[in-house]
Amino acid sequence: QSARLKDLSFVPERNFLFFRESGIPGIFRALQIARFIEAKNIEIIHAHLARDYPAASAAARLAHGAKSVLTSHSPFRAN
């Protein structure tokens, strides 16, 4: 993980929440993220991968006051 965070070395590691790929259902993942959002007073949660959209969106709703931003990295151009 440290190699991936090299460009973000100015951000304390305690401000990141890491997950391993696992079979944990999305609602439990969303609850974990929501608790982290509230503990850190996070206002925006950003998800890049489609598999993360449901958990990120649910977490933002569960953590009152947080907003979610979802970025689609589609290989297709919009006209």
Image (cartoon, grey):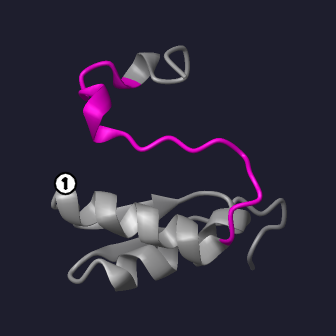
Q: Which residues are magenta?
A: 8-25
- The amino acid type, in three-letter code, at marker 1 is Lys
List the residue tagged with mark 1.
Answer: 40
Task: Give x and y (percent) for residue 63.
Answer: 29, 77
Q: Is residue 64 toward the left or the right of residue 59 in the image?
A: left
Q: Nearer the viewer, residue 15 or 26?
A: 26
Task: Give x and y (percent) for residue 64.
Answer: 23, 83
69 within the magenta span? no
Q: For residue 31, which quarter of the picture?
A: bottom left
Most common secondary structure along the magenta stretch:
loop
Tell me the crowding category of disc 1: few under 14, some 14 to 19, or many 20 or more residues within 10 angstroms, Cα based: few
Name the residue: 69% across, 62% down. 24
Name the residue: 74% across, 75% down. 78
Q: Of helix, strand and loop, which one carries label 1? A: loop
Q: For residue 55, which quarter of the picture?
A: bottom right
Task: Give x and y (percent) for residue 1.
Answer: 55, 22
Q: Is residue 58 toward the left or the right of residue 72 in the image?
A: left
